[in-house]
Each structure stands twice: as structure tokens, then as C-alpha cells.
Image (cartoon, rainbow, N blue to C red):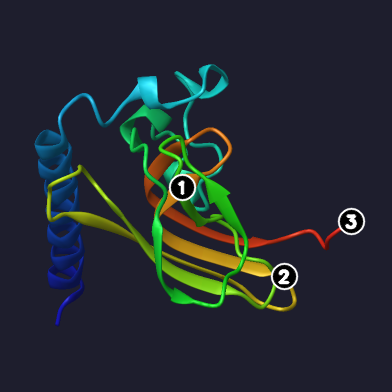
Amino acid sequence: MSQVKKKLRVWKIGLAAIAGYAILICLAGPDLVGNRCLPRRLQGEAHTDYYLSWTRWIPRSATSWCIDDAPVQLLGNQKEKAVARSGAAGPKPIPAPGEWQVSAVQLKNGWPLFLPYLAFTTKSGTHVRIGCRWDDVDHYYTFPSFALAKLAPPGS
């Protein structure tokens, strides 16, 4: 396969992902996505926390989802839980060292559409996550979310 065909394929995949995300946002409606989901200190801010530097211009409002329920842990050994605004308990977004989770959250009650999340932290403290991350402190979701980070040891 030539280099031009490879680049064209990457662009097609990227455009398909953007189109799919745009369709998802249109289906969800303006009440589920946007600035109002964020705490005041993050409104109008960009994703300076994103791993890839060329994605740090993306506004947080474009990836912030107002979902009141906690995620449901489907698989994993993660023990620590937090409580959502709805009163439901779900797994905290960052597993303790040596723990992992696969979870999902329903986009809207009554809809058969769920957003997935996979997260694990190695025993040495490397944290990896991908999917729909729940902020258990400020009660909003970020989708899509990807992280690769070295966590500080407990108590430091």
C-alpha cells in the first residue's frame, strides 16, 4: 500500500470518527452535552490535560456530558466507590494500584445506548484509561477520554 493510500485511509477513519461523534451529540441533544455540565472553573476552558499536544485546543464543552447516574462496573476488581447525584454508587474513575474496571453508563434512561469505560492502574502506579470518564467530584462525564499517566505514590 502506498504512503498516499495509507494517509487517505487514516483521514477517512478520522472523518468517520468525527461524523459518528457528531451524530451521537445530535441524538443526545443540547441538554446532555456542553458547558453547563462543567463546574464554573472549567467552563470556557480547553483540554490542557489531554495526552496528545495537538488535541489540547479542544474545548471541554465539546466533550462534557451531563449524565446524573453513576457508571455500572461490568468487570474488574476495583473496590472503591463514589455516589452520583442520583444516589447510585459507581466505581471511582481512577482505580487503586493493581486494580482495574470495565464499566458503562446509559446515555439516557430508556435508551439502549451505553458509553463504555476501561481503566487500570498497574502496581507500579501507571494509570491508563479510555472511554467515557466519570468525574465523581464534579459529577459530569468526559467522552471521549484517554489518559496515560504515572500516579504519585499514596501519601506523597
| Farthest-out residue, front | 87
Q: Nearer the viewer, residue 26 or 67?
A: 67
> Residue 86, located in which quarter of the rendered image?
top left
The residue positioned 46% from the left and 47% from the top of the image is: 134
Mark 2 crowdedness (10 Å alpha carbons): few <14, some 14-19, many ≥20: some
Q: Which residue is mark 3?
A: 155
SS state under label 1: strand
Instruction: Give the x, y percent position of residue 94.
Output: 59, 58
Q: What is the spatial separation of the Cα atoms under label 2 and label 3, in whole angstroms?
A: 13 Å
Mark in the foreground, 1 or 2: 1
115 relative to 78 in the view: left or right: left
- Mark 3 element type: loop
Quadrant in which residue 117 is drawn: bottom left
Going from N to C along the chain, the mark reached first, 1 or 3, is 1
Disc count in the image?
Answer: 3
- Amino acid at dot 3: Gly
Q: Residues within 10 Å of mark 1 (few under 14, many from 20)?
A: many
**Residue at the image point whose x is 41% and y is 42% from the top:** 141
Can you say whether 67 is above or below 80 in the image? above
Residue 47 lies, in percent from the top left, at 48, 36
Q: For the residues marked 1 and 3, what is the alpha-carbon distance in whole angstroms?
A: 24 Å
Residue where numbered disc 2 is placed: 125
Q: Disc 1 marks which residue?
A: 134
**Residue 74: horizontal and vertical position, in percent?**
38, 71
Left or right position of 118 against 111 = right
